[in-house]
Image: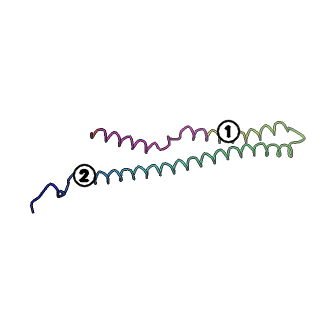
Amino acid sequence: MPDTDETPRAGGLSDAIFRLGGTALALLRTRLELATVEFEEERERATELLVLVLSGVLLALFALLFASIFVIAYFWEAYRLWAIAGVTLFYVALAALTFMRLQQRRRDKPTAFSATLAELGLDVASLRREQ
C-alpha cells in the first residue's frame, strides 16, 4: 500500500502538539507545587507573627500585674516609687524588644509568592523570545 497523506507520520504536527501539551502540563504542575510551598511558608510566617504579638501583649500585661504586686507587697513603707519604676521599666523593656522584633519581621518579610511570580515571568519572557 502506498504512503498517502492520510496516514499519520511519526513526528508530525499532532505529535508535536501532544508533546507541547505534556510540557505545558508539567510546567503548570511545577508552578503549582512552587505556589503551594510558598503558601505554606507564608502561613508559618503569619503564625510566628501572631505568636510574637500575643507574647508582646502578654509581657506588657505581666509588667503591669507583677510590678504592682511586687511593689505593693515589698516596698510599701520605703522607696515604693523607685521600686514601681524599676520593675515597670524592666517589663516595658521586654515588651518593647518583642514589638521591635515583630516590626523587624514584618518589614523584612519577602513578597508573597515571589518565587512563583519570578518563574512565571521567566516563562513569559522565554515564550516571547521563541516567537
Under circle 2, the secondary element is: helix
Q: Residue at x 77, y 39 (%)?
A: 86
- Give the vertical position of 14 relative to 68 (above or below): below
x%, y% of residue 97?
65, 40
Residue type, mark 2 in image? Ala
5 on left or right of 18: left
21 on left or right of 12: right
Q: Which residue is mark 2?
A: 16
Which quadrant: the C terminus?
top left
Q: Residue at x 67, y 39 (%)?
A: 96
Q: Indicate whether residue 28 is drawn in magenta.
A: no
Name the one closer to the observer, 127 or 110. Answer: 127
Name the one closer to the observer, 74 or 46. Answer: 46
Residue type, mark 1 in image? Ala
Q: Earlier in the sequence, mark 1 or mark 2?
A: 2
**Magenta range:** 102-128
Under circle 1, the secondary element is: helix
Mark 1 is surrounded, within 10 Å at the Cα level, by few (under 14), some (14 to 19) or many (20 or more) other residues, namely some
Real-space Cα separation, disc 1 to disc 2, in angstroms:
63 Å
